Image (tube, grey):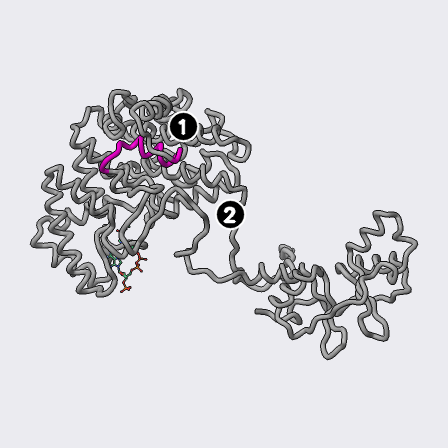
């Protein structure tokens, strides 16, 4: 921590108690300081601050009083060798804004609360790179317990919800805080969200242009921006809780329809509208493929979708919350989050795990292929996790889901998983590397007839619900998220160089 002498204002501006206050004020202004130390026999006898000047000016006395009549006296001094944290504590507890600084009883400077505040901005507390492990908010939405291999939505195990509840129940849990307890409550929620799935005509009109220009996930950003504008989504800051909730439901309900339409238009097919007689995942597969899926595929995909709605303070959820903390509208929060998710280090590519399975081809080749890759420094896609040090609970559940579908790819994946875990334990001892959600996600989605291009967009179609719950929670906290960066460039201020005149 810095010492006072490193941050104080020096040389100190001084005055005499007999001087008119107006003269002291002029000196303050000229030297751009917030206080003048009044001295007697070279020792500090009192202090006049900008507040004293303002007070006298407000009561019309500025021109008539002397410094001695308004100064705070006697004045406490502080030693230049004290550290700034000690000074800050002392000034806060005693209520001082300015204090004369002394060295061996000689006046050498003035320290102000403003100097100390500036210091705390210049030297912010150190945090781990990437904010890893730093708690930046309180949440009731859910959490991930990496050491235990467990994650939850509100008070319920996410995996248990995925196995036992339809997606819309879990959507209600995240956004409204409770699971529906009766069929009427369930129907009331589905009746509310299903009409929101229809693409607004102005958006439908430009969707073919968007689909031609961009991949579905990128296209979703443009389409949602337009949809939010068309709806007249206003800043969260200006809305009450029920208006915010309505916007959040709208954006989350529309996302799967837009993604499916963008995908179909890209492949030259016409969009297919949502159907009220189908469950959530069945409707999604219908909108993608134009065929009603089997109940096995619908159930498998619904479990995947429920299991990926939320997962702690990941980069896209954090992004959504940062934007929400500025009071921006729900459309802005969600499109920002999609941008964060689209990065290869986050949304990842479940398709890459599938490519690995393709490359391996048969279980007897798994060891050799994986050993070669790890020895040459490559990462095995679908293994390892930033938070889990155990098996990823999502991968455990999706393994069962994949096997339940009876797809031969699932059996290959199970055999390959075993080999990869063994090889990683041998070549990366002590790192605790197991299959993550990506490894079986691609297997499940492919078995359900989803093209690899739609793997990450399909993940987005469920994560948007987690984002919206987080946005609604963040909107209740009026504090903007605004951290600091450490400046490491050339020291300022350097004079701005003049532009070189052209010769001749
Ligand atoms: C997910 C991931 C980025 C997490 O990273 P992390 O927890 O920060 O782990 P680290 O990058 O610190 O890795 C720790 C060690 O394990 C190794 N490791 C981690 N994942 C590995 C993998 N999939 N294959 C081979 N080695 C791996 C690292 O090389 C590192 O070894 P080292 O200590 O000898 O350098 C990482 O495991 C990974 O790249 N996995 C593959 C991509 C993937 O599946 N992504 C989807 C995630 S849901």
Residue labelled 1 has its Cβ within 8 Å of some atom of ligand 1: no
Q: CA distance from mark 2 to mark 1?
A: 25 Å
Image coordinates for residue 155, horizontal then vertical, percent: 34, 42
Mark 1 crowdedness (10 Å alpha carbons): few <14, some 14-19, many ≥20: many
Quadrant position of the N terminus in the picture:
bottom right
Image-quadrant location for residue 104: bottom right
Residue 289 vs residue 430, the one in the foreground: 430
Image coordinates for residue 438, horizontal then vertical, percent: 24, 46
Image coordinates for residue 492, horizontal then vertical, percent: 61, 62
Q: Secondary structure at mark 2?
A: loop
Residue 481 - label: 2
* Residue named by callout 1: 250
Q: Residue at x 67, y 63 (%)?
A: 91
Mark 2 crowdedness (10 Å alpha carbons): few <14, some 14-19, many ≥20: some
Is mark 2 in CB contact (under 8 Å) with mark 1? no
309 left or right of 49?
left
Q: What range of the chain is rendered magenta? A: 163-177
State whether residue 136 is above or below residue 6. above
Image coordinates for residue 178, horizontal then vertical, percent: 36, 34
Check the image and name the residue furthest to the left. 364
Q: Quadrant holding ligand 1?
A: bottom left
């Amino acid at each position: 921590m810095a010492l006072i002498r490193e941050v104080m204002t020096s040389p100190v501006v001084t005055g005499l108690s007999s001087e008119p206050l107006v003269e002291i004020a002029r000196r303050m202004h000229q030297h751009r300081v917030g206080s003048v130390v009044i001295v007697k026999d070279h020792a500090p006898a009192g202090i006049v601050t900008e507040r004293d000047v303002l007070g006298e000016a407000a009561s019309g006395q500025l021109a008539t009083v002397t410094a001695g009549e308004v100064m705070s006296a006697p004045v406490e001094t502080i030693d230049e060798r004290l550290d700034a944290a000690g000074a800050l504590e002392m000034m806060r507890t005693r209520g001082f804004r300015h204090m004369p600084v002394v060295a061996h009883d000689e006046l050498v400077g003035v320290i102000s609360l403003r100097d100390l505040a500036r210091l705390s901005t210049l030297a912010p507390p150190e945090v781990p790179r990437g904010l890893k492990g730093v708690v930046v908010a309180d949440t009731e939405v859910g959490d991930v317990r990496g050491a235990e291999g467990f994650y939850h939505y509100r008070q319920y195990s996410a995996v248990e919800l995925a196995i036992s509840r339809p997606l819309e129940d879990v959507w209600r849990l995240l956004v409204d805080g409770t699971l529906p307890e009766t069929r009427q409550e369930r129907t009331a929620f589905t009746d509310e969200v299903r009409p929101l799935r229809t693409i607004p005509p102005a958006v439908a009109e430009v969707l073919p242009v968007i689909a031609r220009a961009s991949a579905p996930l990128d296209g979703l950003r443009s389409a949602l921006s337009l949809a939010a504008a068309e709806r007249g989504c206003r800043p969260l800051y200006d809305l009450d809780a029920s208006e915010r909730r309505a916007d959040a439901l709208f954006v989350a309900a529309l996302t799967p329809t837009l993604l499916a339409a963008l995908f179909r238009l890209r492949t030259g097919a016409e969009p297919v509208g949502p159907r009220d007689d189908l469950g959530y995942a069945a409707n999604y597969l219908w909108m993608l493929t134009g065929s009603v899926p089997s109940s096995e595929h619908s159930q498998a995909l619904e479990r995947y979708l429920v299991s990926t709605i939320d997962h702690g303070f990941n980069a896209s959820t954090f992004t959504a919350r940062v934007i929400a903390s500025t009071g921006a509208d729900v459309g802005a929060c969600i499109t920002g989050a999609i941008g964060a998710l689209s990065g290869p280090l986050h949304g990842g590519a479940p398709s890459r795990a599938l490519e690995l399975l393709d490359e391996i081809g048969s279980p007897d080749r798994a060891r050799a292929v994986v050993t070669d890759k790890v020895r040459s420094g490559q990462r095995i896609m679908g293994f390892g996790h930033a938070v889990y040090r155990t098996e990823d609970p999502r991968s455990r559940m999706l393994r069962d889901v994949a096997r339940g579908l009876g797809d031969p790819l699932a059996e290959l994946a199970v055999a390959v998983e075993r080999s990869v875990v063994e090889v990683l334990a041998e070549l990366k001892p002590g790192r605790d590397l197991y299959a993550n959600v990506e490894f079986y996600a691609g297997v499940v989605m492919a078995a359900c007839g989803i093209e690899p291009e739609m793997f990450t967009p399909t993940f987005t179609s469920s994560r948007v619900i987690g984002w919206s719950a987080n946005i609604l929670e963040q909107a209740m906290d009026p504090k903007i998220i605004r951290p600091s960066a450490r400046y490491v460039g050339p020291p300022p201020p350097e004079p701005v160089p003049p532009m070189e005149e052209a010769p001749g």
